[in-house]
Amino acid sequence: MTKDIFIARQPILDLDRNTFGYELLFRDGPEDVTVFEDPNEATQAVIERAYLDWGMEKLIGQRFGLINADATLILRGLHRVLPPEGIILELRENSNGFDGETLDALQRAKREGYHFALDNVHSVEQLDTSRVLQLCSLVKLDFAGNVAGPSEWPVNRAGVAIHGSILSARPDINCVFHTHMPYTTAVSALECGLLP
């Protein structure tokens, strides 16, 4: 009797909304979500299923494959079972951050050709305090304002509405800033609005 093997594949889009790659996620059944106790075991299962059961070519084609990687996976050297080409390991910076030993392991892996993405970024402050940002090739953001995972930072819905709308309408720009100055409040309160 054959056993069903599950893996989820979530598209990751670039600024032009083209598929850049696929995040490969652990699933233990056909449901859209799954529960697991050890994230490292889930990552190991994704790697085994992607390479041994499904085949990476079938899962991602010529695109990038993004796989969640706990710091202990890198410390133990388990990332080396993956080829550095075409794979991006997603790092989550927890409240404890990364210690010196882990940062050294990440720097060695980067020199070996591995790429990292900073995952679950919900605020600029999080980027300001990141110890691994300089090692990352990309940062994953959710412009719809959806929380991609557990986070202690709340989503600013007004900011998402403003910035997400501008970024969606203008694929030629990569960043939107706005300020909360008294002058802005005064102008927006005028009946005539902002005059040319």
Image (tube, helix red, strand yellow):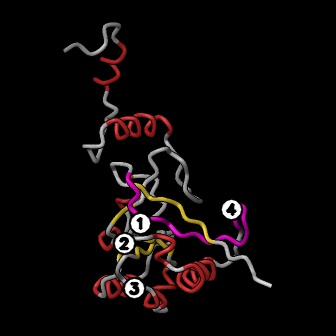
Give the mark, 3 or 1, whose residue is nearer the N terminus.
Answer: 3
Q: Residue at x 62, y 71 (%)?
A: 7
Give the mark, 4 or 2, whose residue is nearer the N terminus.
Answer: 4
The CA distance from mark 4 to mark 1 is 22 Å
- Comparing labels 3 and 1, the label whose residue is closer to the camera: 3
Report the quarter where the N terminus lies.
Answer: bottom right
> Which residue is denoted by mark 2 in the rendering?
132
The residue range painted magenta reads: 18-34
The CA distance from mark 4 to mark 3 is 28 Å
- Comparing labels 4 and 2, the label whose residue is closer to the camera: 4
Q: Which of these two is toward me, 25 or 140?
A: 25
Q: Residue at x 43, y 38 (%)?
A: 159
Q: What is the x, y in percent for residue 119? A: 46, 64
Q: What is the x, y in percent for residue 89? A: 43, 75
Q: Secondary structure at mark 2?
A: loop
Residue 184 shown left or right of residue 76 in the figure? left
Amino acid residing under circle 4: Val
The CA distance from mark 1 to mark 2 is 8 Å
Q: Secondary structure at mark 4?
A: loop
User: Is residue 190 shown above or below 77?
Assistant: above
Report the quarter where the C terminus lies.
Answer: top left
Q: Residues within 10 Å of mark 4 (few under 14, many from 20)?
A: few
The CA distance from mark 4 to mark 2 is 28 Å
Amino acid residing under circle 3: Pro
- Pointer 1 with pointer 2, Cβ within 8 A: yes
> Which residue is denoted by mark 4 in the rendering?
33
Q: Which of these two is toward me, 166 or 123?
A: 166
- What is the number of the mark on residue 118? 1
Q: What is the x, y in percent for residue 182? A: 31, 25
- Comparing labels 4 and 3, the label whose residue is closer to the camera: 3
The CA distance from mark 3 to mark 1 is 19 Å
